Image (cartoon, rainbow, N blue to C red):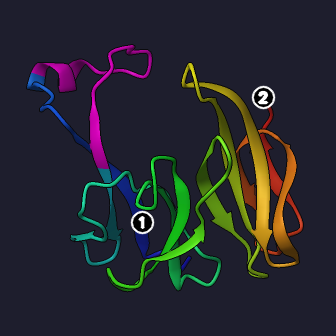
Amino acid sequence: PDGERIVYSEAVYADPISALDAATLSLEDQRVYNLKGANLRGINIVGGGVQHITTEDFQDMYPSFSADGERILFSSNRRGELLGILGIKANGRSGISDLYVNHRNGTVIQPTSAADGTVAFCVVNLDPVRQQVTDHQVWTHYGPDEFPTQRTRGKSPAISPAGDRIAYINP
């Protein structure tokens, strides 16, 4: 939020990727690598250096700063098999809290927040038998929405700072 720090997720693979594989990977690549986990990292753009925000090899992914910059929201499997939304203090590695962790047969990803406290996120619904994606939905919670509310079908939501609009990818 202040333009001085970037937060990202770094994959940790169950088996090492060979240097040849790493050099030849592309966006069109169809190879599958077993993911052991993913950890959150931060980089201070002004001073440099990498901060290890999470280190336990859960699947901590899709980080975004809260509108006030005080917390980092992220998707994680720390509370179960499916991903939910957790938050952590932006200035350190303590204080992980649950925001939204259970959603029927879906996994919750890509949280983004507004100044009024509204959190927009994507729910990826899975066929429990075939383990395939059946739908993507944009939901909101907190702020004026006392309860989780489905807004539309779509993915990759980004809520406006005021919380009155959501940009997303239409399926």
Q: Earlier in the sequence, mark 2 or mark 1?
A: 1
Callout 2: helix, strand or loop?
loop
Magenta includes 141?
Answer: no
- Report the residue marked by disc 1: 6
Q: Nearer the viewer, mark 2 or mark 1?
A: 2
The amino acid type, in three-letter code, at marker 2 is: Pro
Q: Residue 38 in the image: x percent, y percent?
A: 32, 50
Q: Residue 86 in the image: x percent, y percent?
A: 52, 68
Q: Residue at x 87, y 61 (%)?
A: 165
Q: Tell me: 159 left or right of 127.
A: right
Q: Tell me: 102 left or right of 12.
A: right
- Quadrant in which the N terminus appears: bottom right
**Which of the labelled discs sits on residue 34, or is there none?**
none
Residue placed farthest to the front in the image?
129
Magenta includes 29?
Answer: yes
Q: Residue at x 82, y 56 (%)?
A: 166
- Nearest the viewer among 30 and 94 is 94
- Report the residue marked by disc 2: 171
Residue 13 visible in the shown view: yes
User: Mark 1: few, some, or many residues within 10 Å (few <14, many ≥20)?
Assistant: some
User: Mark 2: few, some, or many residues within 10 Å (few <14, many ≥20)?
Assistant: few
Q: Residue 52 in the image: x percent, y percent?
A: 25, 69
The amino acid type, in three-letter code, at marker 1 is: Ile
Callout 1: helix, strand or loop?
strand
Residue 160 visible in the shown view: no
Query: Bounds of the magenta span?
Result: 20-37
Q: Quadrant of residue 124?
A: top right
- Quadrant in which the C terminus appears: top right
Q: Residue at x 42, y 66 (%)?
A: 6
Compared to residue 141, the image places residue 68 above or below, namely: below
Q: Tell me: 66 left or right of 63.
A: right
